[in-house]
Structures are given as C-alpha cells and as structure tokens.
C-alpha cells in the first residue's frame, strides 16, 4: 500500500536528517534539482524532468517568500512521491492555494509540502491548549510558512475542536476542521452576524477573538450556542482567514 503524502514528507526529512525550519534551496541542491524563477504565464510552479535532469520553475510574479517556499516544497512532492511519475507538472495558483480541489495529485503535493515544511510531530509540543491566531503566527514566523498553510497544519494536528475557514469576496471558499470539531461549516455566502462578513462590508476586524452565535457559521446547532471567531484579513487578496474555536467551558455536543 502506498504511503500517505505526509508519510512521504516525513521520510524525506528523515533521509535528509532535517529538523526544524527547512531551507528549500539547500534541499533542492541536495536533491540535485535546479530552481529558477521565470515568467510563467498561467502557472505558479512547474516540475520538469528531462534526460535525467530535474528543474523546478517558480513564477516570478509570486511576491511572498513563504508562498515561494511552499510552491517549491509542493514541487518536491511531485518529485519525491513515486506515483507522481509525469515528466511535467504545471501547477496553477489555485492548485497550490486550494486544499480541497478536484486535482488529486495537486492536493497530495500540498499535503506533502505542509508536512515537509511544518512537521506535525514538531508542532504538537506547541499546542498545549486550543490553538489561536497567536500560536499560528508564532509557528508561521518560526518555520517560515504562510499563515494559511500554518493554520491548516495546526488544525490537522491538534486534538482540540477548531476549524480554519477561508472566505473570499464574502463567500466561504474552503474550510478544514479538526477531527474533534463537532459542527458542519455552512458553505456559500457568509452570514451577516460573522465578523468576516463585516470585513467585506467595509468594517474593521476586531483585534481580539470574539464570541459569535454558532448558527452564523454552522448548520444544525442550537440557536444559543456560542463559538469563538478570530479573523484576519488578507486585504491584497480580498480574503479573510477565520479561526473558529469551541469555548473551553462549554460541553461539546456529539454529532449524531
């Protein structure tokens, strides 16, 4: 049976004797992969195999180092996972930005990149309570990963009930729930009671986490149940990332 993308990422870290933050350019050199920045029309990253040589191309339009690092690690996934055997992988921005897309191998490369850059066994020690934006920022800075990639990896790792939601232009684009988060996030247009919705209406996001009625985010919950919303805007992208947590003093209702 094939390993999961996360297991492949852990294997590569073990083979290279890596711990802590990863220098992707140093890894590329050790793997004998040449990395170039080029004007890639319509693509954010490419993996090219030809005549025994391997190259990774990264779009010069990617302005954030954390995104470049993730794109390179994404291409490492295509290179390293044995069932990704094509000579050319041309990866669009939406392939790398989406964690629930329709392209299975692109989703696998994203999972590989997240674990390779931010290994779950290392961040577990930082998650001694319900994760909030502060710990996500701390890990993002420590490992050189974007807030979004860090939040997703934290949510997948923690045993606490928490969800990360990405909204764009007032609508839920995708969400990732921890295994213990008991509610289903509503897709489509954001409810007007959410702070994320306020942002798209021109209001400022609160700096601190806020209680909101759970029905503003979730389906099938009691009308008086509260959850905690902590949202941050990516104004240049027209997006908001929200961390949703269950108040620690509430009894969690099991999903039927």
Image (cartoon, grey):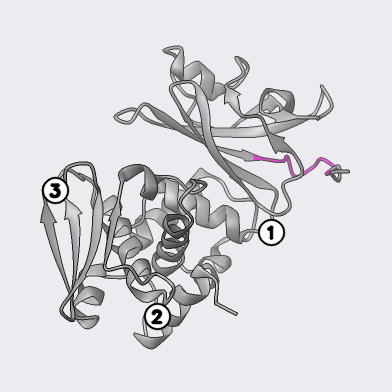
Mark with earlier residue (2, 3): 2
Q: Which mark is residue 60?
A: 3
x 30%, y 56%: residue:
71
Label 2: few (<14), some (14–19) or many (≥20) C-alpha neighbours in 10 Å: some
Comparing 88 with 114, the one in front is: 88
Q: Position of residue 52 (x, y in %)?
A: 18, 81
Mark with earlier residue (1, 3): 3
- Let me know if residue 251 is in the magenta part: yes
Q: Position of residue 120 (x, y in %)?
A: 53, 67
Residue 116 drawn above or below residue 97: below
Q: Main secondary structure of the magenta part?
A: loop
Residue 40 drawn above or below residue 24: above
Comparing 204 with 50, the one in front is: 50
Q: Which mark is residue 106?
A: none
Q: Secondary structure at mark 3?
A: loop
x 66%, y 29%: residue:
186
Q: Spatial distance from mark 2 to mark 3, Cα to Cα?
A: 27 Å
Q: Secondary structure at mark 2?
A: helix
Residue located beneath label 1 in the image: 159
Residue located beneath label 2 in the image: 12
Given this view, does label 2 or label 1 mark the residue nearer the observer?
A: 2
Q: Position of residue 18 (x, y in %)?
A: 36, 80
Q: Quadrant of the C terminus?
A: top right
The boundaries of the magenta stretch are: 245-252
């Amino acid at each position: 049976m094939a390993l999961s993308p996360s297991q492949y990422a852990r294997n590569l870290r073990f083979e290279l004797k890596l711990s802590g933050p990863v220098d992707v350019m140093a890894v590329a050199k050790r793997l004998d992969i040449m990395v170039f920045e080029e004007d890639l029309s319509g693509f954010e990253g490419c993996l090219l195999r030809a005549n025994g040589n391997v190259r990774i191309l990264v779009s010069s339009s990617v302005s954030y180092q954390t995104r470049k690092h993730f794109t390179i690690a994404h291409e490492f996934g295509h290179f390293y996972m044995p069932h990704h055997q094509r000579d050319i992988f041309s990866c669009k921005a939406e392939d790398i930005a989406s964690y629930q897309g329709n392209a299975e191998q692109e989703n696998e490369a994203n999972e590989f990149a997240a674990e390779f850059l931010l290994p779950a066994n290392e961040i577990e020690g930082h998650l001694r309570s319900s994760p909030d934006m502060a710990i996500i920022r701390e890990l993002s800075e420590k490992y050189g990963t974007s807030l979004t990639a860090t939040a997703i990896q934290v949510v997948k790792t923690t045993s606490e009930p928490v969800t990360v939601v990405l909204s764009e232009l007032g609508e839920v684009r995708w969400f990732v729930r921890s295994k213990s988060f008991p509610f289903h996030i509503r897709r489509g247009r954001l409810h007007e009671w959410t702070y994320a919705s306020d942002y798209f209406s021109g209001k400022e996001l609160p700096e601190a986490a806020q209680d909101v009625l759970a029905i503003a985010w979730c389906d099938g919950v009691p009308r008086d149940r509260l959850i905690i919303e902590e949202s941050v805007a990516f104004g240049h992208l027209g997006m908001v990332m929200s961390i949703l947590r269950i108040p620690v003093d509430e009894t969690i209702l099991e999903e039927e």
